[in-house]
Image: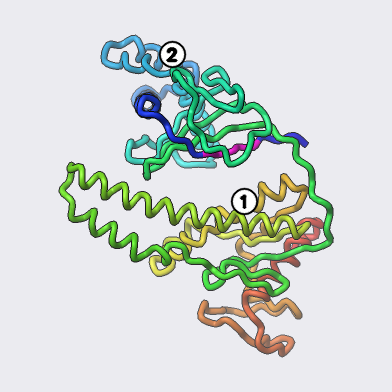
């Protein structure tokens, strides 16, 4: 089966390339904000819906104006791709899959998309449009094919990355009879139906002292000074370290789960609602449940596995796996309980929940419901 995959690498631009990329990021951000304001005003003032063609014509007019002539200094392809991304954002909003598109800020992550006509890939090197030399990319592995699209980005820590979209021939993993149910938590990141418990690394807590010190140093710097900019970069690098460590752990964990199991059953969690609890918001965000579920889904699809999520209202923790008795309530501080139905004692709430999730997931795949 042929699929499209993105391969991400870090690169180190020359001063000339960094200046060109900075102008490109600024122009892409300016076009996004200007067109978004144009579409928003057109709808609220004249009840007029602006499509991609009208937005493209508006961009052409912007390039002709003296005040915005700087848009012609960079490649036109990232600007057009910016309009396509905004059109997709509005489609998702109208389909109620996402919120209304927001304005972009220069303080956040910057990115620009280059189609095949705006870069060249020769002899294992990528050269962007208007660049005189190829990018200095740290190739951790070779690309399987010539990329069709590349996305150049810069994070808040000042690091540059390039993501290459390539077509890849995927082969399904050998079929295995093993199935697993996964219960997500905070004390343990996940507990499987066979009793395996994966400890929660608590990445933010590991770097809490270093992060707090960097933030205190930042708060003492005068606004607008160079020292404040340096301190801000230090805080951003600390946050980037935490995010990279979390992502690396989740990738290794999900790869192991997909390799070992043919069927993977998960619970559905409304993370956005759960983080409203101010006592647990930090721990829930640090766990990365949503990213773990996302990785399991696409990796299972690539490997020919099945990954299913059960209904979020299914009482997996309060339901006894042996007899089906459902408790009226089960506080978070109760880790083991006794079943009034069958008399079982010392029931581990997490292992019991994982077994119920496996049972409900397999029933869902079989079409029998719960």
Percent across and percent down for residue 17 are 40, 26
* Labels 2 and 1 touching (C-beta < 8 A): no
Circle 2 or circle 1, nearest the eye:
1
Residue 99 at least partly seen: yes
The residue lying furthest to the left in this view is: 222
Magenta stretch encompasses residue 162: no
Disc 2 is placed on an element classified as helix
The residue depicted at 63 percent of the width and 67 percent of the height is 183
Q: Earlier in the sequence, mark 2 or mark 1?
A: 2
Residue in the picture at 58% in, 41% down: 140
Residue 278 disc label = none
- Whole-percent x, y for residue 114 in the image: 51, 25
Magenta stretch, residue numbers: 5-9
Residue visible at 40% across and 40% down? 109
Q: How many marks?
A: 2
Q: Kindly tell me whether residue 94 is visible in this rendering.
A: no
Q: Height in image: 237 above or below 10? A: below
Residue 286 in the image, given as x and y percentages of width and height: 47, 61
Mark 2 to mark 1 CA distance (whole Å): 39 Å
Q: Quadrant of the C terminus?
A: bottom right
- Secondary structure beneath label 1: helix
The image quadrant that residue 330 belongs to is bottom right
Q: Quadrant of the N terminus?
A: top right
Is residue 6 inside the magenta stretch? yes
Q: Quadrant of residue 28?
A: top left
Classed neighbour count for the residue bearing mark 2: other residues with Cα under 10 Å, few (<14), some (14–19), many (≥20): few
Asked whether 242 or 59 is in front, the reply is: 242
Q: Categorize mark 1 by other alpha carbons within 10 Å: few (<14), some (14-19), many (20+).
A: some
Residue 47, placed above or below residue 346: above
Tell me, for residue 57, which label it has, or none.
Answer: 2
Write down the residue under mark 1.
Answer: 295
């Amino acid at each position: 089966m042929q699929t499209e995959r993105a391969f991400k690498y870090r690169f180190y631009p020359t001063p000339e390339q960094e200046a060109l990329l900075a102008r490109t990021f600024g122009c892409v951000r300016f076009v996004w904000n200007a067109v978004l304001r144009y579409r928003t005003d057109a709808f609220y003032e004249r009840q007029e819906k602006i499509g991609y063609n009208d937005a493209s014509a508006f961009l052409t007019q912007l390039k002709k104006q003296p005040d915005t002539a700087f848009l012609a200094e960079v490649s036109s392809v990232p600007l057009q791709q910016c309009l396509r991304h905004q059109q997709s954002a509005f489609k998702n909003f109208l389909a109620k899959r996402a919120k209304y598109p927001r304005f972009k800020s220069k303080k956040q992550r910057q990115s620009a998309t280059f189609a095949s006509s705006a870069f060249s890939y020769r002899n294992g090197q990528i050269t962007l449009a208007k660049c005189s030399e190829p990018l200095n990319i740290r190739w951790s592995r070779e690309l399987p094919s010539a990329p069709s699209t590349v996305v150049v980005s810069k994070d808040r820590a000042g690091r540059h990355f390039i993501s290459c979209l390539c077509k890849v021939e995927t082969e399904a993993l050998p079929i295995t009879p093993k199935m697993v149910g996964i219960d997500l938590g905070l004390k343990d990141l996940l507990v499987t139906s066979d009793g395996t418990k994966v400890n929660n690394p608590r990445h933010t807590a590991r770097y809490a002292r270093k992060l707090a010190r960097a933030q205190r140093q930042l708060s003492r710097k005068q606004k607008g000074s160079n020292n404040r900019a340096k301190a801000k970069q230090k805080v951003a690098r600390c946050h980037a370290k935490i995010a990279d460590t979390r992502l690396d752990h989740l990738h290794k964990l999900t790869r192991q789960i997909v390799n070992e199991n043919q069927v993977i059953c998960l619970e559905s969690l409304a993370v956005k609602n759960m983080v409203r609890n101010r006592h647990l918001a930090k721990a829930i965000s640090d766990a990365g449940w949503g990213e773990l579920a996302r990785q399991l889904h696409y990796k299972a699809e690539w490997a020919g596995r099945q990954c299913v999520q059960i209904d979020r209202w299914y009482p997996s923790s309060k339901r006894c796996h042996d007899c089906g008795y459902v408790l009226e309530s089960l506080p978070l501080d109760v880790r083991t309980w006794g079943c009034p139905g069958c008399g079982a004692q010392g029931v581990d709430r997490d292992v019991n929940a994982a077994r119920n999730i496996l049972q409900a997931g397999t029933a869902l795949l079989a079409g029998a419901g719960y």
